[in-house]
Amino acid sequence: MASLLFRVGRFCYRRKWWVIAAWLAALLTVAGLVGALQPKFANDFDLPGTDSGTATSQVQKYFPQVMDEQKQASTSVLVAADDGLAGHTAQIDALVADLHKLPDLTAPNKVVNPLVVAKVQPQLATSVLGDHGKVGLIQVHQNIDVTKLTVDQMNQLKSIVAAHDGNGLQVAATGSLMQVHEAGGQAEMIGFAIAFVVMIVAFGALVAAFIPLVTGLVGVGLTMMLLNLGAEVMSINQMATGIVTMLGIAVSIDYALFIVSRYRSELQRGGDRADAAGRAVGTAGTAVVFAGLTVIIAVVALMVVGIPLITQMGSGAGIAVAVAVLAALTLIPALLGAFGRFAFAPRIPWIRHAEPSETAETNGVRFGRLVTRRPLPFIVAGLAVLIVAAIPMTKLELGLSMSSDDEAPAQALLQRGFGEGINGPLLAVLHTDEGNIAPAAEEAVAHIKKLPDVANVATLTWMGNGTPRPDVGADTALISVIPESAPSSPATHDLMEQIRDFAPTVAQQGAELHVGGQTAIMSDLSAKLDKALIPYLVVVVGLAFLIMIGVFRSIWVPLVGTLGFIFSVLATFGATVAIFQEGWLGLITHTQPILSFLPIFLIGVVFGLAMDYQVFLVTRMREEYIHGMSAKDAIIAGYRHGARVVTSAAIIMISVFAAFMLAPDTTSKMLGFALAGAVFFDAFIIRMMVVPAVISMLGDRAWRLPKWLDKLVLNFDIEGGAVRNRGIPEVATQDPGSPEPVGAPS
């Protein structure tokens, strides 16, 4: 592979303008298709193969008007006063008058002061007034698809809420208008800015620092447009794009950083620039290929979970990584060729030389000597930090809240005035192919009314799909059950299971019963994730472990790296729980459960990224070892050549991920923090401390395979022995295909 990549790198360097033109053509073509087709991302959440998924499908099929209503903008405006709403009638009337100015109201006559509704229609009083008349609810429905709401419309509502909030009246809102995603770009720009500064320090030159940013922009731009284009032919959820952007930026810049850094090192060894580019791609590029392959396996294997959203996230992330690898192998050498001898100019005079000599005393070398001299304290200290960080994981709670922090006050008022379960109704769906559903529906309603934890017993009824009257000749019934407890509480879960337990009784009447709604979806999602976790880990860790054996030609190095990953991911879970669920350090104003799909997704991404740094740092150690250095000297040499680059890459990735904590939606915040924390724990503690320390203790045994296995494992030549000296005049007479034996002078 090294020989093939050498030729690719040299070709792209020499045919730079053709390669750059090809990338530009690809960007323009995909952009043109996106502009012409105008595809839209979806916002629905589907869970096929589950009871709640069946319920959702039946609602879509038999109650399309209900689904159409759910697709239309619906916003809840809450008003509250500790002295009672009756004393703030004029203020509420003024608020209602301003709410009427919102565009495309479906039923303006229903946007009414809740005090008026309670007086005119006493039977509806409990649905609009709560907490003994201290909390009121105003529902605002708009004839606008939720995907087409604009930021200006959201800001209009926020201005109305702010204008009437005060003088003893609290006003807050939650729902469609409050969930409009503002135009992205801030987090990405911050990530790119920090990355640029880090690369200036890493290279000591402006142009070299600029090149990885170009590939990052090109790679992420192309990936996002490809995903957008895919939304034309399949349903792709908007939520899937956040992680794709984060991961795409991070790996694009990181992979480019490794190639450019190795190119600089090869330039100093002499020879033609095109050959130096070939050697860089043949050595560091080989590591990029295997690192990228590991990440792709980890994220694409998420499809074994069987949840469309997670499959879309994993597949999109896999595309992003594949594009990043392709850009690193082709676009980077082309850009290096375009800049030629100016690639590492202008130099920043006050920054220390970025590529030290073989005898330089760098901080990386000093740290490497400490690790190899006393490895055990580093192993114990590193693992102790991770264990302490993992302790809060014992309090892990999973949930699925897509609301923003701006909605928290309104949601608190909803719970205060109308019960904790108001935000998570259970939807029981009954269907029969044998005639009238009414007898089964009436029996189900009577049964549910007797169950504990039902908040709307007095108003509980069923809605049919009959015509012209919903309750006449219907074959399907819909029952909306509001729990008294919160959606994530055990009591609500028990209520859901008790309703499902009534399905056999319904079946005796020739009908079927399924329960959907957010709470049911969350329960089924957790069960599906639990069931898929072990198969997923077997697939990902198993395949990656086999790849690592081929990469390092060792059993111990992949084993140590995999065990280290377990410690780092547990520490990441603990830190995420501490910040987002428990509210430590005050970084999050409104705490909430951890996103239900975060654990399994984080495992996939973190494992891929962990193997990234394992490959980039440890392959250099192996490269020096097989070319003659002792086991410990090879570790120190790996630090000399790799510590600065790996550190820079980790800081860039942490910065890119952490910048997404500035996003308004909780999903991006939590994913950004968790991924940033995972990279910190894994790169700096596991890969830079624990793994080299363990390898140091193992000595020569770390780089050996059993004889029977050595015959079976292909030699991928990830160290680039076949191209190590190509194009260097003073060693041109050596056989480039034969790596130097262990023990030979370096």
Image (cartoon, rainbow, N blue to C red):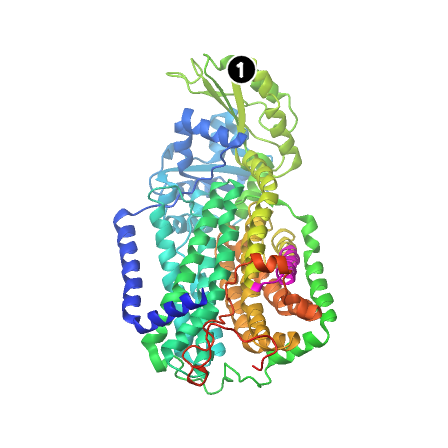
* Image vertical order of residue 42 relative to residue 628, above or below: above
- The stretch in magenta equals 552-571
Please provide percent x and percent y for residue 590: 58, 51
* Quarter that holds the C terminus: bottom right
Q: Position of residue 13 (x, y in %)?
A: 34, 73
**Total tally of numbered discs in the picture:** 1
Q: Quadrant of the N terminus?
A: bottom left
Q: Residue at x 61, y 66 (%)?
A: 687
Q: Measured along the vertical axis of the image, is residue 695 above or below residue 491?
A: below
Q: Is residue 42 left or right of residue 569?
A: left
- Note whether residue 170 is visible: no
Q: Which residue is mark 1?
A: 440
Quadrant in which residue 727 is drawn: bottom left
Circle 1 sits in a helix, a strand or a loop, which is it? Answer: helix
Counting from the top left corner in percent of width and height, residue 11 is at 33, 70
Q: Give the dominant element type of the magenta stretch: helix, strand or loop.
A: helix
Classify 151 as above or below 658. Answer: above
As for residue 622 lying within the magenta part, the answer is no
Could you say where residue 325 lies in the image, as x and y percent from the top left?
43, 62
At horizontal 68% and vertical 74% (from top left) the residue drawn is 371
Give the amino acid type for the residue marked by disc 1 in the picture.
Answer: Ala
